[in-house]
Amino acid sequence: HVVRQAQLGKRRRMVLEGMPAWKAKAFIFPILREKVLAFDSSFETRSAFEHLLRAGRMNPKAAVPEATRNDRAMACALRGTSLRLLFASLQRSVLHERERAARAAAEALEERLRRVAMAAAHP
């Protein structure tokens, strides 16, 4: 049978949604960076990601906060999710409605990665 993509459980989603925005961003952005650059490390993709960092007011050198056991478990759960699900978590739980520039930057980056995937699938 087909193996399902790893997802954040209901409890982890609730914890992520309940975190202060700065802490949720500190969890998601470094993991998102790893996954995005592993998928496509072109100049355009790196630039789109840097734009997302600026729009989301994140430090480009930020590392995942893994101070407590729960923090380590959250980081592990996020690392196990797909890139698509990380973008969904970013839009749903981390970026607030008023952060329009960051939401637009996330959507632009996600669209860029879709185009890269389509070009790779249909050379």
Image (spheres, grey):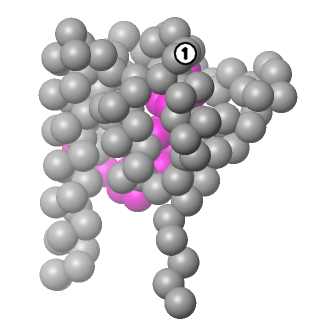
Give percent across and percent down for residue 69: 83, 28
Would you identify the image quadrant in which residue 58 lies?
Answer: top left
**As drawn, is 19 to the left or to the right of 102?**
right
Residue farthest to the front? 10
Give percent across and percent down for residue 59: 48, 14
Residue drawn 55% across and 46% down?
A: 8
**As drawn, is 65 to the left or to the right of 116?**
right
Q: Specify start and end residues of the magenta stretch as a single range.
A: 26-44
Residue drawn 41% across and 58% down?
A: 39
**As drawn, is 6 to the left or to the right of 77?**
left
| Most common SS among magenta residues | helix
Q: Is residue 106 magenta?
A: no
- In the rendered image of this protein, does residue 40 appear above or below residue 86? below
Give the quadrant of the C terminus: bottom left
Can residue 59 be seen here? no
- Mark 1 secondary-structure assignment: loop
Residue drawn 47% across and 29% down?
A: 29
Residue type highlighted by circle 1: Met
Which residue is denoted by mark 1 in the rendering? 19
Q: Is residue 37 magenta?
A: yes
The count of marks equals 1
Can residue 56 be seen here? yes
Residue farthest to the bottom? 1
Give percent across and percent down for residue 98: 21, 10
Q: Residues within 10 Å of mark 1 (few under 14, many from 20)?
A: few
Would you identify the image quadrant in which residue 108 lies?
Answer: top left
**As drawn, is 56 to the left or to the right of 118?**
right
